[in-house]
Image (tube, rainbow, N blue to C red):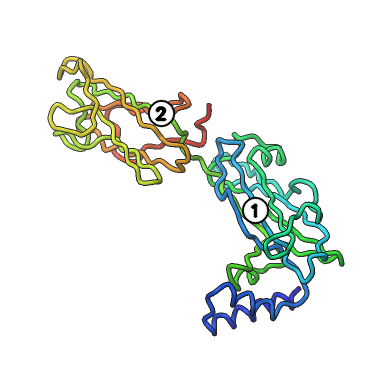
């Protein structure tokens, strides 16, 4: 195998010197130098991010057996590892690698466009939790699942993550074979209607960043969409603000409710509070699950609003 890897590295250096850029040239050079061996070439992946709040969230890898002879393929074993990157609880709950599903045989492969054996391996968050004996409360954003596989040939040789050494994927996009695929655990905001209940204790609406009004709370989604909500101020216009029909400055609190709708597929939402100029502003933010994720009292400082999406479950 070491000789085969050296051959790949040599091919990589040749490419650098000649300035070859197309996959066709990469294939020609690599195949000319490749000694007898085999690897699983990744052709497609999905699920680089696993939704912590959705046990049906999944990841998959499609790989093709590239060897001197397709009949050399004996079996493929697939493994999954969970890495706990949360240090707040003081416990490392990392597990694995554990075998994911039964050993694959040639019967589990189809024929690719190149006439080679090809198959897809997929798992869901629910599958992973069951495999590791974990529950959803034990994982959080930033943790990761690593899918790995080892191919065994009919002559008994095996090829896996320890054999690639980075050089197989270095020679070009066609020969992408790191023998592993990492998916990060993420906590996107719940899709649906979010409710913001607002109050001004003095009763003259919101004065946020200035005594004349200022901007409202903003919610920015990963696609660039920005929502802005606030109570209207008695001292300056603010587009899209909520009026309190009972607003009488200095007599009763100003109150109002605004909603925003977060679409399906949103991966991030950043909320920002512009400030409380007179120390009179209070508000809560309630997610579609009914959980109150923010509860601000008068006099709160400006800045990002900490919304814990990871623990926002129904």
Q: Quadrant of residue 202?
A: top left
136 and 56: which one is in front? 56
**Local crowd size for mark 2, using a 10 Å CA cut-off: few (<14), some (14–19), many (≥20):** some
224 vs 292: above or below: below
**Local crowd size for mark 1, using a 10 Å CA cut-off: few (<14), some (14–19), many (≥20):** some
**Residue occupying image coordinates x 22% and y 20%:** 244
Which residue lies under the disc numbered 2?
A: 193
**Residue occupying image coordinates x 17% and y 37%:** 210
Q: CA distance from mark 2 to mark 1?
A: 34 Å
251 and 261: which one is in front? 261
84 and 255: which one is in front? 255
Residue 303 locus on image (x, y percent): 32, 40
Using residue 10 as the reference point, say whether residue 257 is left or right of it.
left
Residue 3 locus on image (x, y percent): 74, 78
Using residue 314 as the reference point, say whether residue 7 is left or right of it.
right
**Residue occupying image coordinates x 81% and y 62%:** 73
Q: Earlier in the sequence, mark 2 or mark 1?
A: 1
Which of the numbered marks, if any, corresponds to residue 268? none
Q: Quadrant of residue 131?
A: top right
- SS at badge 1: strand
- SS at badge 2: strand
Which residue ends up furthest to the right in the rendered image?
Answer: 155
Using residue 305 as the reference point, say whether residue 45 is left or right of it.
right
238 vs 245: above or below: below
Image quarter hosting the N terminus: bottom right
Which residue lies under the disc numbered 1?
A: 61
Residue 314 locus on image (x, y percent): 53, 26
80 vs 69: above or below: above
Q: How many marks can you see?
A: 2
């Amino acid at each position: 195998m070491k000789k085969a890897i050296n051959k790949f590295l040599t091919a990589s250096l040749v490419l650098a010197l000649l300035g070859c850029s197309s996959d066709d040239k990469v294939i020609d050079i690599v195949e000319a130098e490749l000694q007898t061996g085999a690897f699983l070439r990744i052709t497609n992946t999905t699920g680089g991010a696993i939704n912590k709040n959705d046990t049906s969230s999944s990841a998959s890898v499609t790989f093709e057996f590239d060897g001197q002879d397709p009949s050399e393929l004996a079996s493929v074993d697939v493994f999954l590892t969970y890495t706990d990157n949360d240090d707040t609880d003081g416990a490392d709950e990392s597990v694995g690698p554990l075998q994911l599903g039964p050993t694959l045989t040639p019967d589990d492969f189809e024929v690719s466009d190149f006439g080679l054996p090809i198959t897809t391996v997929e798992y869901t968050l629910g599958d992973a939790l069951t495999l590791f004996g974990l529950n959803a409360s034990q994982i959080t954003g930033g943790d990761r699942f690593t899918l790995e596989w080892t191919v065994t040939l009919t002559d008994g040789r095996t090829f896996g993550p320890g054999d690639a050494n980075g050089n197989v994927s270095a020679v070009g996009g066609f020969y992408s074979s790191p023998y592993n695929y990492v998916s990060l655990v993420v906590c996107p905001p719940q899709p649906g209607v979010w409710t913001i209940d607002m109050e001004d204790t003095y009763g003259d609406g919101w004065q946020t960043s200035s005594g004349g009004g200022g901007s409202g709370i903003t919610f920015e989604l990963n696609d660039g969409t920005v929502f802005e909500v606030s109570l209207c101020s008695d001292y300056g216009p603010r587009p899209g603000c909520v009026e309190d029909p009972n607003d009488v400055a200095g007599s009763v609190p100003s109150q109002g409710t605004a909603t925003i709708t977060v679409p399906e597929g949103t991966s991030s939402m950043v909320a920002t509070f512009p400030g409380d100029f007179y120390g009179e502003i209070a508000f809560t933010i309630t997610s579609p699950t009914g959980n109150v994720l923010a509860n601000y009292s008068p006099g709160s400082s400006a800045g990002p609003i900490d919304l814990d999406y990871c623990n926002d479950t129904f």
